Amino acid sequence: MNIKPIRNDEDLELTFNRLETIFQAQEGTLEAEEMEILVALVEAYENKHYPISPADPIEAIKFRMEQQGLTPRDLETYIGSSGRVSEVLNRKRALSLRMIKRLHDGLQIPYESLLSGA
C-alpha cells in the first residue's frame, strides 16, 4: 500500500482510478483498508477545493414546493398572507426567524438552507 496526499486534480484522478480497482474489496483486507483511507483523502480534497455551499433560501423553498407539488397558497401557513408569500418568493421581503422555523418544521427544509442568505 503506497498512499500519498492528494495535492491536485491529477492526483485526484489517479486516486479515483485506484479506487475503481479496489472498491469491492472484502472487508478486513489490505485493499479494504486502503479504500477507506483513499475515500477519506478524496473527501478532504474535495471539501477543501470544491466546497458545496448551502442552497439559497428561496431556491430551497421553490425546490420543496416542486417536490411536493405545492402552490404559493400552500405556503401561507408558514409565511403569512398571499402578499407576504409573493414578496418572499420574489425576494422583496426577507424571511423572518418565525417563517424560517415554520418552514423547517412544516416542510422539513434544513435550517442551513433557510439561513444561508442571512
Image (cartoon, grey):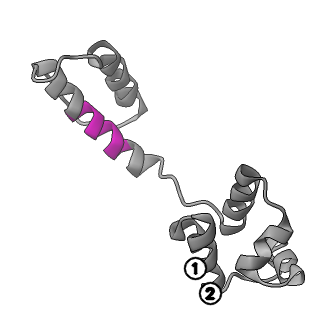
Residue at the (78%, 53%) spot, across then down: 69
As helix, strand or loop, the secondary structure at mark 1 comes to helix
Q: Amino acid at mark 1?
A: Lys
Query: Is 80 contained in the magenta span?
Result: no
Query: To which residue does mark 2 refer?
Result: 98
As helix, strand or loop, the secondary structure at mark 2 comes to helix
Q: Quadrant of residue 21?
A: top left
Q: Point out the stretch of residues depicted in magenta.
A: 37-45
> In which quadrant will I find the N terminus?
top left
Asked whether, in this view, residue 58 is left or right of residue 8, the answer is right
| Residue positioned most to the right | 83
- Tag count: 2
Q: Position of residue 20 (x, y in %)?
A: 35, 17
**Circle 1 Cα neighbour tier, 10 Å, few/some/many (<14 / 14–19 / ≥20):** some
* Residue 26 sits above or below residue 36 on the image: above
Camera-side residue: 4 or 103? 103
Asked whether, in this view, residue 66 is left or right of residue 110, the answer is right
Q: Quadrant of residue 117?
A: bottom right
Residue at the (53%, 58%) spot, across then down: 53
Query: To which residue does mark 1 refer?
Result: 101
Q: Position of residue 45 (x, y in %)?
A: 35, 43
Asked if labels 2 and 1 touch by Cβ distance under 8 angstroms, the answer is yes
**Circle 2 Cα neighbour tier, 10 Å, few/some/many (<14 / 14–19 / ≥20):** few
Q: Position of residue 91 (x, y in %)?
A: 80, 75
Whether residue 6 is visible here, answered yes or no, is no
